[in-house]
């Protein structure tokens, strides 16, 4: 149930399917999939193959991941610690963006949001913009909102949540950046409303049946690649949109 600032209430029953960023402190073990086997399966003339990274990947050998076939990477910039809490930079952000730039791998970003009003969506975007001054961002910057397990604490309708995401992305666009909405299949189909921005789909399956339009697909969080020794990593496939760099 969500209530917006005008007192309008939205009620919808839905199954909880939380999609966490990979390699958290969870004790759940998954079978690692060799990056190269995924690359060989999904690489063609219409695709670019990449990963998304954060502090959970530890210290990365950027030359090795490029040699392994990484053609782009989305980097976690940061987020908030909770509703109305302080912003934080991912501890590996600067190391990751500079390392990727040094080896010529195109980069995009993602920001983990706790926004529950439209104005907070704009504030999130302005904070992001302040952090990336001086960096050339090749690919879109993603709005990543995954707080479904505590949704009632946000007191926001689904409609307002969509407007909040759109405001984040509108603000980035106003400042000359490309933007994208990251979410999993279920929430894209049942929660998020209309947006004119591209979609980065998270669906951990070998052949997605998502019927909506998307330009990037997060295929699994369990890829294993040379150059990232501590953890597995998210494997992404981007299509035509991401070739415009």
Image (cartoon, grey):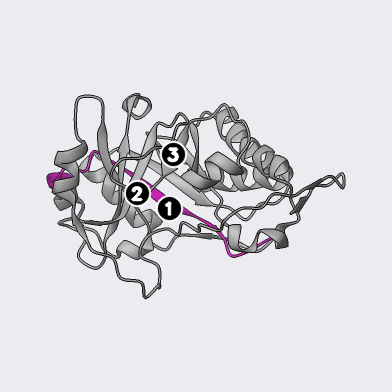
Q: Residues within 10 Å of mark 1 (few under 14, many from 20)?
A: many
Task: Name the image quarter holding the C terminus.
Answer: top left
Picture coordinates of residue 183, whole percent (x, y):
49, 45
**Residue 241 seen:** yes
Q: Residues within 10 Å of mark 3 (few under 14, many from 20)?
A: many
Residue sitting at x 20%, y 24%? 45
Q: Secondary structure at mark 3?
A: strand
- Estimate the spatial distance between the alpha carbons at disc 3 and disc 2, rounded to whole Å: 20 Å
Q: Which residue is mark 1?
A: 76
Q: Are marks 3 and 1 in contact (CB under 8 Å)?
A: no
User: Which mark is first along the chain, 2 or 3?
Assistant: 2
Q: How many callouts does the rendering have?
A: 3
Q: Secondary structure at mark 1?
A: strand
Q: Which residue is mark 3?
A: 200
Task: Name the image quarter holding the N terminus.
Answer: bottom right
Residue 210 occupies quadrant? top left
- Left or right, 36 with respect to 6, comes to left
Residue sitting at x 31%, y 51%? 220
Residue sitting at x 55%, y 58%? 16
Bounds of the magenta span? 66-83
Picture coordinates of residue 4, whole percent (x, y):
80, 47
Q: Are marks 1 and 2 in contact (CB under 8 Å)?
A: no
- Left or right, 165 with respect to 34, comes to right
Q: Which residue is mark 2?
A: 97
């Amino acid at each position: 149930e969500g209530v917006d600032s005008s007192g309008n209430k939205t009620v919808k029953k839905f199954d909880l399917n939380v999609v966490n960023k990979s390699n958290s402190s969870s004790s759940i073990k998954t079978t690692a999939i060799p990056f190269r086997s995924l690359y060989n399966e999904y690489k063609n003339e219409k695709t670019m193959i990449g990963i998304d990274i954060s502090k959970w990947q530890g210290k990365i050998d950027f030359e090795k991941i490029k040699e392994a076939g990484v053609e782009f990477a989305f980097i976690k910039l940061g987020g908030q610690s909770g509703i109305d809490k302080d912003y934080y930079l991912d501890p590996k952000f600067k190391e990751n963006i500079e390392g990727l730039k040094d080896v010529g791998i195109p980069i995009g970003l993602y920001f983990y949001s706790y926004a529950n009003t439209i104005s907070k969506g704009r504030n999130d975007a302005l904070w992001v913009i302040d952090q990336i001054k001086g960096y050339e961002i090749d690919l879109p910057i993603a709005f990543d909102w995954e707080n479904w397990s505590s949704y009632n604490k946000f007191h926001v309708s689904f409609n307002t949540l969509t407007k909040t995401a759109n405001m984040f992305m509108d603000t980035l666009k106003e400042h000359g950046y490309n933007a994208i909405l990251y979410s999993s299949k279920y929430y894209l189909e049942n929660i998020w409303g209309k947006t004119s921005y591209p979609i980065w789909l998270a669906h951990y399956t070998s052949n997605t049946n998502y019927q909506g339009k998307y330009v990037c697909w997060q295929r699994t969080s369990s890829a294993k690649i040379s150059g990232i020794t501590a953890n597995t990593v998210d494997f992404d496939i981007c299509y035509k949109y991401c070739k415009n760099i």
